[in-house]
Amino acid sequence: MARRGPGHLGQLLVAAPRQQQGLRAALPAAHASNDLGRKRAVLMNFMSSRAVYAVAGAGLIAASTLALAQKPSQEAPYPSKSIRMIVPFAPGGGTDIIGRLVAQELIAAWGQPVIVDNRGGSGGTIGTNLAAKSTPDGYTMVLCSLGLTYATALYRDLPYDARKDLTPISRVASQPFVYVVTPSIGVSSMKELIALARSRPGELRYGSGGAGGASHLGTELLRTMTGIDMVHVPYKGTAPALTAMLAGEIHVQLIGIATVLPHIKAGRMRALAVSGARRSAVAPELPTVAESGVASYEFDVWYGMLFPAGTPHPIVDKVNAEINRALKSLALGQRFAALGLEPAGNTREEFAKLIRSEIAKWHKVVQAAKIRIQ
């Protein structure tokens, strides 16, 4: 006998009511003819059909129950294969190092490879777009920085929407930035710097590692909040900007504190204030910009992990929990400290809220400062 599938069983079950209707039609005719043999044949045929349908229905129910029982066991626990971590910057930079440190922790926890895939270019937007367009199955994630939020204001035609096309997992690290000046301008606090800039509009020069970068945007935030007028001098990277400041070509710079700490200690630069919402553990004696008189000023350079939008929440929650567990480890904390970083985990909801608020803030700053990156 040929094997018949579930579709045949369904057809049998659907046909059952039609057989009952046939019985109701056939019996009166048999009674009318007063043919006992005909009556018996009609009844036997109906009972045989009922037995077939009962067996078919039982088989269909059993098959469905078996399929449901087997389904959970067929789903492999996450992660069951290698994970790609896109870093939208070149190898060797700060974001790349953070990504590799976190990848090591995830490998140790899960026993699955976490492959760092560097996709630099266009301020991180190329790699971020690749991640946003990836399959949302939990096997592609991207490590972004604060630049994720201000890129939405800087670039006219981004091929993705940071608020809709990505699912935040967790913030990972925060990098304290500090305002430093050359000793030659004779200021020792943010209040004095702002007063000097107001008295000499357009004369002070501030440097950055490039137009549209963190230092540039952070200083423009200060300018829009205080109304001071300083000239922006962009360089091709942090190192050239630092060299220019040591040579006296620029007067002010907002820069990672770990980068300039040796120069501060040697007296070649003077630190005025840290840019974040709280004081830095690296230099706790330095006040924040807000403490120095610019109320509500806050510029935190953070790094965080995201999935493509649509990634199942249980997977997002599992990765969030593992990242936050790793951030509490002493070993990772020491490695971060050596790089001038601070562990900064949070929930996926908190990270999503942070991204939305930062996007709104940078749109206002970019518009007020009339910044545009071609």
Image: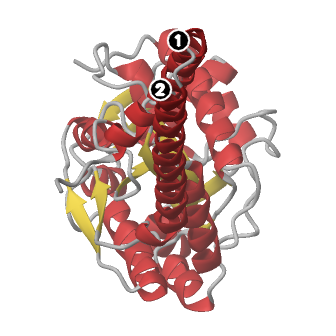
- x then y, percent, for residue 148: 43, 37
Given contact means CB atoms under 8 Å apart, are the residues at marks 2 and 1 in contact? yes
Residue 56, label in figure: none
User: Which badge, 2 or 1, comes first in the chain's sequence?
Assistant: 1
Q: Quadrant location of residue 316? A: bottom right
Above or below, 46 against 87 in this view is above
Q: CA distance from mark 2 to mark 1?
A: 9 Å
Residue under pointer 1: 33
Above or below, 297 against 136 in this view is above
Q: Quadrant of the N terminus?
A: bottom left
Residue at the image point whose x is 51% and y is 77% from the top:
336
**Of residues 242 and 204, which is closer to you in this image?**
242
Residue at the image point whose x is 51% and y is 16% from the top:
26
Q: Is residue 1 left or right of residue 354?
A: left
Q: Amino acid at mark 1?
A: Ser
Residue at the image point whose x is 18% and y is 41% from the top:
121
Crowd tier of the residue under label 1, counting other residues whose Cα lies within 10 Å: few below 14, some 14–19, many 20 or above: few
Asked whether residue 299 appears in the rendered view, the answer is yes
Above or below, 91 against 302 in this view is below
By what rule are the colours in the image chosen?
secondary structure
Residue at the image point whose x is 28% and y is 22% from the top:
159
> Which element is circle 1 on?
helix
Q: Amino acid at mark 2?
A: Arg
Q: Quadrant location of residue 15? A: top left
Above or below, 355 against 103 in this view is above
Residue under pointer 2: 38
Crowd tier of the residue under label 2, counting other residues whose Cα lies within 10 Å: few below 14, some 14–19, many 20 or above: some
> Which element is circle 2 on?
helix
